[in-house]
Image (cartoon, rainbow, N blue to C red):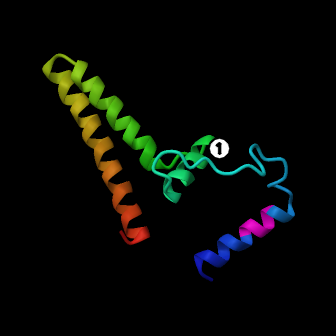
Amino acid sequence: MNVSTLAERQILKAQAEGQFDNLAGAGKPLDVSGDGSMEAVGYRIMADAGAVPREIGLRKAVAAQAHVLKETTGEDAIRREMAKLADLQLRLDIEIEARRRFFGT
């Protein structure tokens, strides 16, 4: 069974169970602000639902850790913060590579 068939079955099941009834924004056009790509619209819908991809969360964590590292003083503390940043960056790189392989880009 391919992914499209599985996804379609899950959608039909959710529809039959009434999970799409009374959703916020039902019947209104999608907000296509930004670059208007389907990927951007999909990410916005997931973010509104509180389901952010790990890649996005890791990007935020890398930025936050880089800020922590910038403010850190002391050789040992800097090493610890650099190790945390390297770990987060590695995890982010793995997520990016997994997405690229999955989507074939």
Residue under the image location 74 percent in, 45 percent down: 25
Q: Which residue is mark 1?
A: 49
Residue under the image location 72 percent in, 68 percent down: 10
- Location of residue 4 by image quarter: bottom right
Q: Main secondary structure of the magenta part?
A: helix
Considering every residue shown, the one lying at the far left of the view is 75
Q: Position of residue 84 (x, y in %)?
A: 29, 35
Magenta span contains residue 4: no
Q: Position of residue 87 (x, y in %)?
A: 29, 43
Left or right, 82 with respect to 61, comes to left
- Give the residues in magenta: 10-14
Give the answer, above or below, for where 77 lies relative to 88: above
Q: Position of residue 27 (x, y in %)?
A: 78, 52
Q: Position of residue 67 (x, y in %)?
A: 29, 25
The amino acid at mark 1 is Ala
- Location of residue 42 by image quarter: bottom right
Residue under the image location 49 percent in, 57 percent down: 37
Give the answer, above or below, for where 66 lies relative to 21: above
Residue under the image location 33 percent in, 42 percent down: 88
Q: Nearer the viewer, residue 81 or 30?
A: 30
